[in-house]
Image: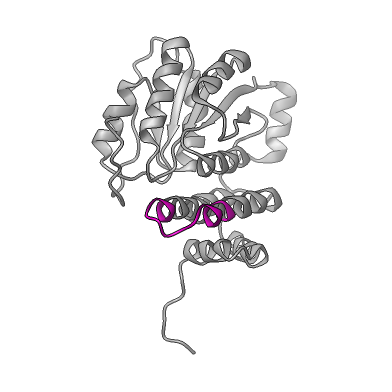
Amino acid sequence: LSDAPALEPHVNYYQRMLAEDQDEGEEIVEDYLEDHSAAELYDKVLIPALSQAKSDRRRGQLTARDEQAVYQCTRAILEDVQDREDPSAPNKAAASTEQETFPPEIVRVLGLPADGTADEVALLALEKILDSRRCKMDVVAADMLAAEMVSLVDTKQPRLVCIAATAPGGLARARYLCKRIRARFPEVRILIGRWPLSGNLDSIRASLTSAGADRIAGTLLETRDQLLPLVQLKPNDHNPAPFVESQPDCDDRDVSS
């Protein structure tokens, strides 16, 4: 037996994705789901793998093909993940009875990837952990231009826009999108997902808040939990943009762009 410590799940998963070994990737996912919720899988395994691929590509350690292989294999695994009971989700039987008595309003959410395919795949993961009885999320393709995304806000008329900016990078584009949407649609709530949260936290908060963000979340779980309360705020409510403090793991250099 080797004395080498076992690789962390997200590292093992990332290596399998680079090898385009989807079968072993699915085994890692299934093993992880035996003791964890789907939301934990996405936050602790899939999102770190997407972030690592983006980081390695920026450093020239991956080809464009290798990077896209990670994204496409992860997208396929997301589609194949079986629905499992999430202990943090509402009781289904009670929720069904409540829905029959008091049908909740369906909140329309538009998911915008700020900086490429990693953001799009991350939004697809977020979509899977939202309560489908309360939220309907439309995820926009990563190749859509910023102007087209802003026009889509007008077409879709969402209550909330969720802009994904998977680390590293992407903050300048997220800020640009946020400013344009806020200028045209002052009543729309804007939630920015910085997954995983990294960089200079004070600078990130100041930059995105000044661009018009209502909330900033550092994990998919935080994003899910902030979404509905944010929509329920009245337009004139005092609404700072907090996020959970965590240790930075990289220095994003596009914050002030």
Closer to the camera in the image, 94 or 84: 84
| Picture residue at 60% right of the left edge, 59% below the top | 33
Vertical placement of residue 27 versus 127, above or below: below
| Picture residue at 37% right of the left edge, 20% below the top | 212
Q: How far across and how far down the image is residue 165, in percent?
A: 44, 37
Judge left or right: residue 154 versus residue 176: right
Coloration mode: one colour
| Picture residue at 35% right of the left edge, 36% below the top | 243
Asked if residue 84 is among those painted magenta in the image, a careful observer would answer no
Q: How far across and how far down the image is residue 79, in percent?
A: 69, 48
Q: Is residue 158 visible in this depiction of the protein? A: no
Judge left or right: residue 254 versus residue 46: left
Q: Is residue 251 visible in this depiction of the protein? A: yes
Count of numbered circles on the image: 0
**Where, by quadrant of the figure, is residue 105 drawn?**
top right
Asked if residue 60 is among those painted magenta in the image, a careful observer would answer yes
Q: How far across and how far down the image is residue 18, in percent?
A: 55, 62
Q: Taken as a whole, is the magenta stretch helix, strand or loop?
A: helix
**Where, by quadrant of the figure, is residue 102 drawn?**
top right
**Range of magenta residues:** 55-69
Vertical placement of residue 44 versus 176, above or below: below
Q: Quadrant of the C terminus?
A: top left
Judge left or right: residue 58 versus residue 46: left
Vertical placement of residue 58 versus 172, above or below: below
Judge left or right: residue 101 versus residue 16: right
